Image (cartoon, coloured by chain):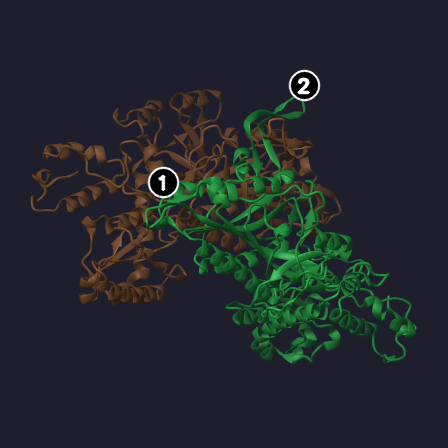
Chain colours: A brown, B green
Amino acid sequence: MLTRAGARGRFPACAPAACLLEDFRAIAYNNPLSTRAIAPILKGNGMAKAPQTAITPTRAEDYPEWYQQVVRAADLAETSAVRGCMVIKPWGYAIWENMQRVLDQMFKDTGHVNAYFPLFIPLSYLEKEAQHVEGFAKECAVVTHHRLEAGPDGKLVPTGKLDEPLVVRPTSETIIGATYAKWVQSYRDLPILINQWANVVRWELRTRLFLRTTEFLWQEGHTAHATRAEAEEETLKMLNVYATFAQDTMAMPVIRGEKTAGERFPGAVNTYSIEAMMQDRKALQAGTSHFLGQNFSKAQEIKFHSAEGREEFAWTTSWGVSTRLIGALIMTHSDDDGLILPPKLAPQQVVILPITRNDEERGPVLEYCNQLKKELAGARYDDAPVRVTIDDRDVPRADKKWQHVKRGVPFIVEIGPRDIAGDTIMPKRRDQSSGEKKPAVSRVEFIAKVGAELAEMQKSMFERALAQRAANTRTIARLEDFEAFFTSKNAENPEIHGGFANCHFVEGPATQEILNKYKVTIRCVPLSDEPGFEETVPGKCIFTGESTTQRGVFAKAY
Amino acid sequence: MLTRAGARGRFPACAPAACLLEDFRAIAYNNPLSTRAIAPILKGNGMAKAPQTAITPTRAEDYPEWYQQVVRAADLAETSAVRGCMVIKPWGYAIWENMQRVLDQMFKDTGHVNAYFPLFIPLSYLEKEAQHVEGFAKECAVVTHHRLEAGPDGKLVPTGKLDEPLVVRPTSETIIGATYAKWVQSYRDLPILINQWANVVRWELRTRLFLRTTEFLWQEGHTAHATRAEAEEETLKMLNVYATFAQDTMAMPVIRGEKTAGERFPGAVNTYSIEAMMQDRKALQAGTSHFLGQNFSKAQEIKFHSAEGREEFAWTTSWGVSTRLIGALIMTHSDDDGLILPPKLAPQQVVILPITRNDEERGPVLEYCNQLKKELAGARYDDAPVRVTIDDRDVPRADKKWQHVKRGVPFIVEIGPRDIAGDTIMPKRRDQSSGEKKPAVSRVEFIAKVGAELAEMQKSMFERALAQRAANTRTIARLEDFEAFFTSKNAENPEIHGGFANCHFVEGPATQEILNKYKVTIRCVPLSDEPGFEETVPGKCIFTGESTTQRGVFAKAY
């Protein structure tokens, strides 16, 4: 705990400990991995240790463990008794619902409709596309029996063996493709533009909440087209939908690009992805869009008569994002006090906490809070009423407040008799430390400004993330610089990685060998309209020296 | 096909065939099983056969097959290659989305939040509640392996055997209960009011689209409370939510009641249901709400410290409705031309069909249609803009129109040059035959009235269904009348059943034996605020003669 004795030197001795704590937090927020960096300053000021935070360990101390602790402290999810499967708790699920709502509207606005296909896939379906089954065979949950009966020892055992085992869908190209084959006869039946919201299962050996779980929730778009050009256009259109969603709704900058051959979806002709930089400078693939060519339509026989009367195979695409996005959200925005939610996705944008010392105060305070709630809910942000709630549970004041801090609520407003007397409000904005705290505002002013404030916070979170990415992105032309970028790290802090390296490269075994050595991956070849990649620049592959104009983004990755 | 030659006698000889057809349809709609009843009239008028309908067979000819044909003709769903699993097609899924939207808001308005729990349940969890596992063991899909590898013949076989088999959830009381046990320590942690939207699997031997499928979509509410009274209140509250939804949104009258011991959910103390009468007079259980007492909390150890410091077991409930509701919707409202959708659930409430004979007409007609669409979308119904679309696909006029008739769109509006010239519209309301067709209305009038028209249609559909139920419900006091009610049916028409019989009864083997004989089931003991059941009426069990005040609703059932 930070004591007054420690508050010497550049800090005024009279400042209360909590205030100093906020100052450190402000520094820490702006440089997510700076706690250790400021430790010597603290020491020089006679401070024995770093300030206490709501989350232990801090990001600087142990990023992966910090992540797990934020998931827990923000009530987002927890592990279940079933290996690798998570329970998504109400607060985490409400974020997912908000993501679903926005994405679903974007899909519908681009002409898609929803449908639902079976959870189970016959083994024979999966086998039809050789690359596809090879990619998923090692992680399939397989249903082999359809009933349970008491065995000799009274314990239940599976009985009723199935003639053909069923795979719990790891993705639905094969079962959906088989259905499309029945639906499509003529070019008039195309395009088919369908999305499905579903659960999928991939038996992962190492799981981490949201980032990699055995069962996860996602959406998978599956479209079929009469021409190659249309299918390619669809693939990129949906990649752009994902990028827009990531940037506008999640406040998370992403790079859109094409995956190299080694990183393609099993069975795809081209895979495109959006790649985001997390606070530890690792990359996270946040969404993918696949041009499947005629691979699946040939395997599943999706054939049609063209306008010219020829029998042709359809061209298909698939695209998906999953609950992994919640992991991306956490690692883009949160701090050592927990989650920070972009206002567009926050299940509650303002939480009002009534502060009363006795029953006498309770009535008038609650009345004021209810009135304030009503007025705030009358304000609008993001084409909807501001989402506001009162938390008047019988829980100690500090616990209650910290719970909402850890959960990332954009604005926390405490209301006590003194605030009511002045008819003023001291809103605490979650992405600003109290060090940046603005003076109290009148109730009327806050209500008038709350929409704009939320918009400003959304914008500011995006800009901060963008600045963080820019600060940790390098254009690198020599292998030794590449090596240095990914190895010259703080020995105390093995979780700090170089960041994003933009390099000329040629794919191949020699390139791959070097990448393996540094545990670095090629994230994507950015699209030609990505900032910094608009022009064709001749150069040499930094791994092999071959001449090439191809540039990629390299990073360690989740 | 009905010909002019047949249009004699009471029908004016000059009436076009289509008009007569509509007249017959009007009769048929009002009495869903009347086609055969009017056949002699047709014959007497020199008509050789019943009028052609969009759905073959008609309801009167073969109700179960008619049902399957409506599901198909309305593009709602189809069977898949996976035994008992269905593909829910976009139009069917859009109806489910509308159901979800309304129900989800009702759940939230009653204080519930959504969350998500694992698809898989360890076998050991299921075994903890003896009655529960007994109820579900015979229909469990069991995952036994977690990977696939090529066998000696190159074919894939399941490998990676699991130490403990996993059951694909048939319902989630056990896995959710185990989680609640971790969340609940003190009375302050209660109540927990959570709902989950999910897929579940029950390995059914005989499946029928929507009504009984191996995999289905549903919501399952799971709540935990500190007191018995609170849990009982919750159970009835959610039953009432379901009844309100069925009646207000689905336009489907239901009876709320308690299930008898033999019909309870496995592991429940009390099960309540809403029961609806289908057009063939069979009952369909459309939703259930269970008071689970402390059975599951004892099995799963959901314990808490009460305000008085005692350790107590929580009281739990669960409640659910599923995609079965779509089956109920079809069998409550549809006719021999296909689906009829209550406006509140119709994915499109108005479909505009541009009618053009040549390219010259196309421009102005489309322009008029677009303007009309915009104006209609500016009108409101059910607190939302009217859902309107233009179908200008290159499909023959009649085919296109019938497609929307079969899909149950509330209003179909054909727009051709003549309509534009008069600036008038001839809206075809799906639940009214053309026999009842109103004169053309001005465009302006239709736009002004469309919301009220949709509301009137919603109300009218409910009233028609209510009248159908009333006409086929009897209070029966003697066993011979009961027997006659369920056996005296048209020999030509084995699908016509008696309907609902309200009788005094006492549960027991003797009662059950008679019910089995007639394949009749006790649907429920109606709540004391159900119309007709408000008063305690002494009587005698019609099966055993015992004195009792208990009255039940009896019917053949889905």
Q: Is residue B111 left or right of residue A308?
A: left
Packing grade of label 1 (10 A; few <14, some 14-19, many >=20) is some
Q: Amino acid at mark 2?
A: Pro
Specify the quadrant of the image occupied by residue A331: top left
Q: Is residue B412 above or below residue B228?
A: below
Quarter holding the N terminus of chain A is: top left
| Secondary structure category for the residue under label 2 | loop
Q: Residue at x 52, y 61 (%)?
A: B241
Packing grade of label 2 (10 A; few <14, some 14-19, many >=20) is few
Where residue A20 appears, as percent x and y from the top left, is 15, 44
Q: Amino acid at mark 1?
A: Arg
Where residue B301 appears, as percent x and y from the top left, is 44, 40
Q: Check residue A72 in the rendering and tell me which mark sits there, or answer none.
A: 1
Evaluate whether residue B535 shows in this view.
yes
Q: How many marks?
A: 2
Q: Mark 1 — on which chain does it sit?
A: A
Q: Which residue is mark 2?
A: B152
